[in-house]
Amino acid sequence: MKKIFPFLLLLISFTAKSQLVTDSVLIEQHYRTFSYNIPSVNIKNGSLMFLMHGSGGSSSDMIKRTAKLESLSASQKLLVVYPNGYLHYWNECRKYSTAVANKENINEPAFFEAMISYFHTKYNISEKKIFAAGFSGGGHMAYKLAATMPDKIKAIAAVVANMPDSASCDCVLAGKAKPVLIVNGTKDETNPYNGGEMFVNNASFGVVRSTENTFHYWASLAGYNGEPVKTLLPDADPNDQKTIEEYDYRQKNKPPVTLLKVVGGHHDYPNDIDVYVFAWAFFKSVK
C-alpha cells in the first residue's frame, strides 16, 4: 500500500487577493508538489480543475496564464490546481520521451488520485467534477488522464498537443468516450498539426497523430458520424494574424468533442480567446 503524506506544507505566499499554497504528496518515495489558491468561499461539492504545464516547465508557468479564470473561481465553486511534473516533465503516453519521468516510469495516476483525495478531504470537492487541461506536454498528460483514468476525470482540454501514434504510445488506452477539447495551431513547429515526429528541446519524443486524427479518435469513441458543426470565432485580435475555426460534435446523451483550429497558430496561445476560460466554459457544458 502506498504511503501518502498529503499535508506536508512546503510554501505559503500571500497576495492582496489570494493565498497561494504549495503542498505535496509522497508517491513511491517521491514528493510530488502542486499549488493552488485557498478558496475564499465554501466550495463544498464544487469542481476541481487541474492545469498542467508544458515539458520543462513548472506550475508557475500556468499560474501566470489564469488570472481571468481565477477571478471566476469563487462564483463558480471552482478550485484550480497547478501540479508540477517530476523534474519538470510528465510521464505521459509518449514511449520515446527522453524525460526522466518517463525513463523512471513515474506513477502519474497515483499522483493525481492522491491529489483528488487531498482536495476531497480538505475542501469537500466533488469527486464527480474533476477536470484536467494542459499545455503541450501538459496536454499530453491530459490525454493520458482521459485515456487511462476515465472514471476519475470528467473531461479534458489539450492545448498544442496531439496524441502519440500507436507505435509511439506506451499507455494501455481504455477506449472510453470522454468530453475532449483540443486547441492546436496550423503552423505549430513542435506539435505538427498534420502529425509527424515531435521534438522537445532538440530531442525526439516520437511520432504524434495529426490533429484531425486525434480529434476523430475521441469523436469516434463518442459515436459521432458525419461532419462536425463549423463556426468561425470572432477575430478579437486581427494583428496576431490568427483566426480560430471551431469544429464541434455535440448531441444529447453523448460527450461533446470540440476542436479549435487556430489558423496561423504556432506552439503558443491564440490571442482571440482566453484558452482556460474557454476550457472551463466547455467543462461546464458537460452533463
Image (cartoon, rainbow, N blue to C red):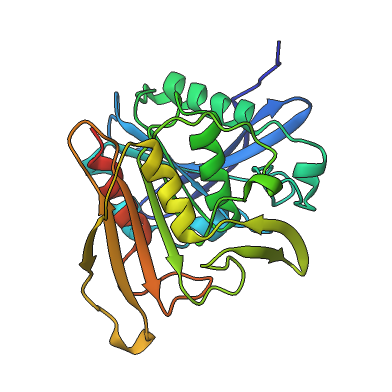
Q: Residue furthest front?
A: 226
Specify whether residue 94 is in view: no
Residue closest to the eye, 48 or 247:
247
User: Quadrant location of residue 275?
Assistant: bottom left
Asked whether, in this view, residue 176 is left or right of residue 256, the answer is right
User: Quadrant location of residue 223?
Assistant: top left
Q: State how many labels appear.
A: 0
Establish if 233 lies above or below 159.
below
Asked whether, in this view, residue 256 is left or right of residue 252, the answer is right
Residue closest to the eye, 31 or 116:
116
Q: Position of residue 132 (x, y in %)?
A: 45, 42
Q: Quadrant of the N terminus?
A: top right
Q: Residue furthest top?
A: 1
Residue closest to the eye, 123 or 143:
143
Seen at 37% across and 85% down, the residue is 240
Seen at 50% across and 75% down, the residue is 266
Establish if 144 lies above or below 258.
above
Q: Position of residue 193 (x, y in %)?
A: 51, 67
Q: Position of residue 171 (x, y in %)?
A: 65, 35
Specify whether residue 259 is in view: yes
Residue closest to the eye, 249 or 63:
249
Seen at 61% across and 29% down, the residue is 109
Establish if 150 lies above or below 243.
above
User: Quadrant location of residue 177?
Assistant: top left
Establish if 114 lies above or below 241.
above
Seen at 39% across and 41% down, the residue is 220
Q: Position of residue 94 (x, y in %)?
A: 68, 47
